[in-house]
Amino acid sequence: MKNLLPILVSAFLLAACAPSYAPYSVKPDADLSCSEIRGELARARNASDEATRNRGLSAQNVAWAVFFLPGVVANEYTNDQVQRKASERIGTLNRLYAAKRC
C-alpha cells in the first residue's frame, strides 16, 4: 500500500505531460480572417509536431514504462488522437484558406 501512492502520483504527473489539442477557435471558422487562419494552422501543426515527438521511444514513454507500464499505451493513444484531430483541422483550415483566396 505504501508503494501505491508514489506510483499513482507519478502516473498523474506524467499524464499532465501528454499533449492536448482542441481543434476549435474562438470564432466560427467562416468568420476567421486570413491571418487568424494562419495562426490556427500554426497551432494545429505545433500540436501535431509535439505529439509526433512524444511517440515511440520518447523520454515520456520511457518514464511511463518505468513507473506505470499501461501508461505507455495510454500515451500512444493520446498522441495518436492529437495527431488525428490536428490533421483533420489542418485539412479544414487549408480548404477554408483556399476558399477565401488568402
Image (cartoon, rainbow, N blue to C red):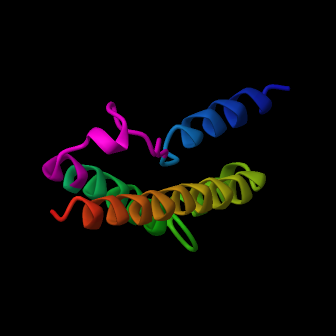
Q: Which residues are magenta?
A: 20-37
Q: Which is more toward the observer, 89 or 81?
A: 89
Q: Residue at x 62, y 37 (%)?
A: 10
Eyeballing the image, is 30 above or below 50? Answer: above
Q: Outermost residue toward the right?
A: 1
Nearer to me, 24 or 56: 24
Compared with 94, 31 (above or below) is above
Residue at (55, 68) in percent of width and height: 55
* Image position of 86 (left or right of 1): left
Total labels drawn = 0
Tell me the residue at 79%/31% (across/down).
4
Q: Is 32 colored magenta in this rendering?
A: yes
SS assignment for the magenta stretch, majority: loop
Residue 101 highlighted magenta (yes or no) = no
Image quarter hosting the N terminus? top right
* Location of residue 57 in the rendering, given as x and y in whole percent from the top left corner: 56, 73
* Residue found at x 73% / y 26%: 5
| Placement of 79 over or under 19, stated as above or below | below
Res 27 → quadrant = top left
Identify the image quadrant of the C terminus.
Answer: bottom left
How far from the left and from the top, in percent, is residue 90? 39, 62
Q: Position of residue 2 (x, y in %)?
A: 79, 26
Q: Nearer the viewer, residue 22 or 61?
A: 22
